Image: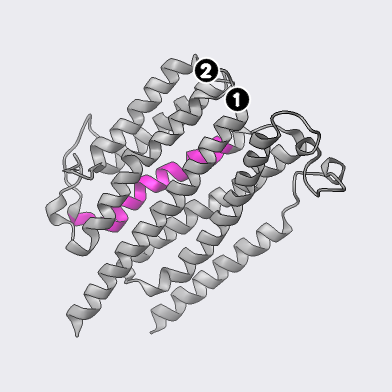
Amino acid sequence: MLNQRFSKTTSLLLIATFALAMASTVSAAGNDTIDDTTGLPSFLSDGIENDGLQMLTFFLFFVGYISMGAAFVFFMSERGSVAPQYRTTMTLSALIVGIAAFHYYYMRGVYAEFGVVSIEYRYMDWIITVPLMALKFPSLIGKDAITDTKFAGLGFTGICFTGALIMVGFGYAGEAGLMHGLPALIIGGMGWAMIVVATGTPWTSGLGVDNDKISPELIWSANALRWFIVVGWVIYPIGYLFSPGADLLDGNQEAMAVAYNIADIINKIGFGIVAWMGAKKATEAIAAASE
């Protein structure tokens, strides 16, 4: 009972801290950039041809930080409703969307004031949240399901972290013009492949995962997480193709942002939802077995 109260108190404190931080953060959009008639950034009301795509981009930035913030509150509120061994998973889920909410708030502000899609804020978010997403898989399925198999001296966590850093690092190098966009995309894709090899696919065990040791209540969630990694993450390279800095297709920052924003909303919130579903189901099984 004491642990449960402590967990609820911690969750409420974190939610309150997040809410106060969001409320006290000053928007990057100054009053001089707002159209007095529409209440929207001026460049969205100046009648240029690209208004529709720009409006969608602004809308998705707005939806991004609101939905990520709401997901943070939800995951922290639900943290105390799962068994103790799954609370780390809920905390990771909350951290991922909470960090993303802050970055989306600033990305929206930069876009509203300057009409520019910030890759700097984007990659600051990804360099933190992508490794956390890799950590969430073993926190859910349990250490018993993680094998001792190593590749190049790296275990499961090492492979996932290295793959995440390669994916994000070379993605930024390509978009920032530090190297040509195509080899950066290919090398970054190798980082994604490392994560897939380690975690497995919906049809196979991974190099670092033994499906037979995943509890029946969690196997659906584990496979759902793999679907996000194998399929959901493919949306990101589609957005990368439109990056003006990568110079692969005709650069269109709005098309890039729309793809990235949709991918983030689907993958980060969805990743947390399926983990929560598995944790709840496993908690119910534990409670039933103890009766």
What's the mark number on residue 3?
Answer: none
Instruction: Give the amino acid at mark 1.
Output: Asn
User: Is 94 located above or below residue 282 in the figure?
Assistant: above
Q: Residue furthest left?
A: 212
- The magenta stretch spans residue 173: no
User: Is 137 located above or below residue 179 in the figure?
Assistant: below
In the structure shown, which secondary structural element does the residue marked by tag 1 occupy?
loop
Return the x and y of residue 145 as percentages of the image width and height. 18, 53
Return the x and y of residue 246 as percentages of the image width and height. 53, 19
Tell me the magenta residue range. 122-144
**In this figure, which residue is indicated by the disc labeled 2?**
249
Q: Quadrant of residue 200?
A: top left
The quadrant of the rendering that contains the C terminus is bottom left
Residue nearer the viewer, 21 or 175: 175
Instruction: Give the amino acid at mark 2.
Output: Leu
Disc 1 vs disc 2: Cβ atoms closer than 8 Å? yes
What's the mark number on residue 252?
Answer: 1
Q: Quadrant of residue 233?
A: top left
